Image (spheres, grey):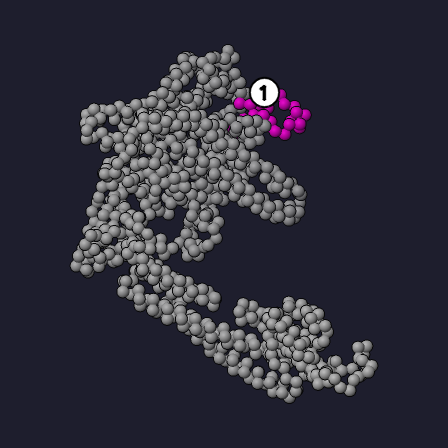
Amino acid sequence: MGSMFRGEEVALVQLFLPTAAAYTCVSQLGELGLVEFRDLNASVSAFQRRFVADVRRCEELEKTFTFLQEEVRRAGLALPVPEGRLPAPPPRDLLRIQEETDRLAQELRDVRGNQQALQIQLHQLRLHLAVLGQGQGPPLATAQMDGPSERTPLLLSPGGPHKDLRVNFVAGAVERHKAAALERLLWRACRGFLIASFRETEQQLVDPVTGEPATWMAFLISYWGEQIGQKIRKITDCFHCHIFPFLEQEQARRAALQQLQQQSQELQEVLGETERFLSQVLGRVQQLLPPRQVQVRKMKAVYLALNQCSVSTTHKCLIAEVWCATRDLPALQEALRDSSSEEGVSAVAHRIPCRDMPPTLIRTNRFTASFQGIVDAYGVGRYQEVNPAPYTIITFPFLFAVMFGDVGHGLLMFLFALAMVLAEDRPAVKTAQNEIWRTFFGGRYLLLLMGLFSVYTGFIYNECFSRATTIFPSGWSVAAMANQSGWSDAFLAQHAVLTLDPSVNGVFLGPYPFGIDPVWSLAANHLSFLNSFKMKMSVILGVTHMTFGVVLGVFNHLHFGQRHRLLLETLPELTFLLGLFGYLVFLVVYKWLSVSAAGAASAPSILIHFINMFLFSRSPTNQPLFPGQEVVQSTLVVLALAMVPVLLLGTPLHLLRRRRHHSRRDPAGRQEEDEAGLLDSPEVSENGWGSDEEKAGCPEDEKEAKLVPSEVFMHQAIHTIEFCLGCISNTASYLRLWALSLAHAQLSEVLWAMVMRLGLGMGREVGVAAVALVPIFAAFAVMTVAILLVMEGLSAFLHALRLHWVEFQNKFYSGTGYKLSPFAFALEDE
C-alpha cells in the first residue's frame, strides 16, 4: 500500500562503521536524513561515552558563538543567512575552528573593553567640565554679609582654636533623581555648617554602562572643618557621586577648563578610531559566524550520534543500529559505500531481526502535512496501521462545512487561504515569527478545503450571509395557496410572514434543482423545516461515518493476519451498528420516499417506532411504515443483542483454544513461544508489539510473561462495553452537526437584522443612506470576521476534530505508536 494509506515498511539495520570512516559515514547519513539511530549505550552515563570530549569542545564553541552573536546584535547588526550546503567539517578542522573563533572573540573583547574604558573616561571628562563650568567664582561670597546676622556672636574673641579655620570645597556630580536626597542628608548630617549649590547640566550625557542618556546635577559644597569634610566625603561616596578637584583661583580654573576640553577632543578622536576598528572586527564576525555555527552544530550532532554506537571488541569499527525505511535501504548502502571508499575499508549494512515495534513512517507534503498533523495530535499510529489521514482530507472539511455552511463566509475563508497558498514561497511569509500567523499558515490547505466545502454546503442550505439567493426558479406557487386559503387583506396586513403548506393542491410545482428552495426563507415555518432536515441529515452522516470506520478496521485485520477478528469482532460490530442505527437511517430514507406531502400530517412517527422497537411493543395511534415492520424490528433487536456475547467472548475463547492447541501439539518446545506471541497480541497487552505484527520482525530471546486469561477477558469486556455504549452516544454526538449549523445560521440572521437591515432602512435619500452605510458596513464586516469567521469557525473546527478523534478513529485506530525521527541536519539547522 501507499505510504499515505499505511505507514511504510521500516527495517532494523545494523551498521559496521570503520573507525577511520565512522565520522564521514554518519555525516553523510545526516545530510540524507534516512535513518534513526538507536542508543546502544543506554546504560552508560553521558560523561563516560567515547566522544564526550569532542561534544564538550563543540559546546564550548557554541558558547563562544553565542557571545559573538550577542555582540553583533548589540551593535544593531544582523547575521546573514549562510548560502549553499555546508557539510560537517572533518574532525581535524575542529582545532583550527576553535583557535580562529577564540582569537576573534578575544580581539572583540579587547576592543570592546577599550571602547568602554574610553567611554567611561570621556564621560568623566564631560562631568568634570560641567562641574568646573558651574560658576566663575566660589560660592563663599554668598556667605559674606554686609551686616551681622542672628547667629553672629556679639563678642568675638581675638584668638582661640578656630582662628586658623579656612573654607574648603567639594565639587562633583550626582544623578538627578539622587540630588534632592543628597542635599537633604548633607544638611541634616552637617547641621547646616556648609553651603551647597546644585545646578543641572546643560546637556544630557550618555551613560557608558547602560547606553542611555541621563541628566546629571553638578554640585559645589563649601564647608569649614576637617570633621565636616569627612562626613561630606562619606555621604557622597554612599550616593556614588563623581568627585573632582576644584581650584579656588579663577585663572587656574580657566586653565583647567581649557586642558580638559583639549583632552576631551583627543579622547573623542581616539574613541572614533576604536569604534571604526570595532566595526571592522564585527564585519569579520558577520562573515565567519553563520557558516561556523552551521558546521559546528552539524559536527556536534555527528558526535552525539556516534556516542549512541557501540565499539567492537577489536576496537576497529563502531557498531550502530538504525531504523530505516525498506525503500531507502539501497540509498543507505550507496551512501555508506561512497563515504568509506576513501579509507579503503567499506562500511557494511545488513538487516537484523527484532521484536520491538518499529517506528511509524508516513511521508507528507505541503498539502497532506496539516491533515496528518490532525491525526498525529490524537496519537501516532502503530506500525503499518491504517492511516486515517487520506480520508480526513475529505471528511474533516465536509463535516466542518456542514456546521459552517454559508456561501459568503466560506468564500472569505477560501480567499484568505488561497492568498496564503499563493504566497507560500515568499521568504517574508515563511520566516514570519508571529505564532498566530504561523498556525494559520501551517494549516493553509486545510483552511482552503474548509472554505471550499463551506461554499458547497452554503449552496445546499441556500444561505449567503444568511440571505437566500434565487439561482433557479422556485418550485412553489404561492398563488395556489392564496386562491385556496381565502386570505383577506386584513389577514395579510397582520401576518407579514406566512406558513408554507405543501399539502395544498397546486402549490408544489417540482423540486428545486440544487439545494433548498429560496421560498422557504420567507416562510414562518422555515426554522422547523430546516430543523427536521438537518437533524435527520446529521444522523445519516454520523451512522455512515462510523460504519466507514468499522469497515476500515477490516484492512488492519487482514494486514496483520488477524482473520479471526473478521468473524468475531468486525461482523458483530457491523451487525450491532447497522441493525439498530442503520435501521434508523433506513426508516428516515423510506419515509422520505414513501410519504407524500398530502399525507404528511398523518404520517407515522419514526421516533415512536424506534422506541417501540426496543420495548417490543406497538402504538395503536402510530401506524407502521411498511407491512411486517414489527417482525423486522424484533428480529433486528434480537440479532443485535445476540452479537454482544459473540463480541465479548469470541476473541478470548479463540485465543485460549489456539494456545491449548499449540500446547497439545508441542508441549515441550513451542509452549513458551506461543504464550509469548499470544501475550503480545493487542487483545492481551495494549502497549506490546502484537503477535499479528510479528511478520515485520523476528522474535528475540527475551523471556515473555505468560498469558493470563483474566486479562484477556477483561480487555475484551472493556472493548465490548465501549463499542456498544459508544454506538448510542456517538450517534447522539453527531447531532452537533445540526446544532452548530442552526447556531451559525441564526447568528448570521441576527447580525444581518441588527446591523445591515437597520442601516439599509435608515433613510430614503441617496446622500443620507450613503453616509450612514459606510460605518454600518464597516461594523458588519468586522463583526462578521470576528464572530462568524473566527469564533464560529474555531467552534466548528473543534467539534469536527472531536467527531474524528472520538467517533471515527476509535473504531479502527489505536494511535499507540511513535514516529520515525530521522537523524537529519535539516532539523538541526532549523
Above or below, comparing residue 414 to residue 347 in the picture: above
Q: Which residue is mark 1?
A: 484
> Residue at horizontal 26%, vertical 23%?
657
83 in the magenta segment: no
Identify the image quadrant of residue 711: top left
Task: Pick whichever, 193 or 697, lies toward us.
Answer: 193
Above or below, comparing residue 10 to residue 509 in the picture: below
* Amino acid of disc 1: Gln
Quadrant of the frame with the C terminus: bottom left
Quadrant of the frame with the N terminus: top left
| Residue located farthest toward the left when viewing the structure as drawn | 344
Q: Give the magenta part as a residue range.
A: 473-502
| Residue located farthest toward the top when viewing the structure as drawn | 620
Task: Pick whichever, 127 or 249, lies toward us.
Answer: 249
> Residue at horizontal 17%, vertical 59%?
344
Identify the image quadrant of residue 371: top left
Q: Residues within 10 Å of mark 1 (few under 14, many from 20)?
A: few
Task: Pick whichever, 649 or 752, lies toward us.
Answer: 649
- Res. 788 in view: yes
Element at badge 1?
helix
Residue 187 coordinates in the image, percent (x, y): 70, 71
On the picture, is 292 further left or further right than 700?
Answer: right
Residue 443 coordinates in the image, percent (x, y): 43, 46
Residue 539 coordinates in the image, percent (x, y): 45, 27
| Residue located farthest toward the bottom when viewing the structure as drawn | 251
| Residue located farthest toward the right when viewing the structure as drawn | 154
On the picture, is 421 further left or further right than 17?
Answer: right
> Residue at horizontal 45%, vertical 55%?
432
Residue 222 coordinates in the image, percent (x, y): 69, 79
Task: Pick whichever, 223 or 577, lies toward us.
Answer: 223
- Res. 540 in view: no
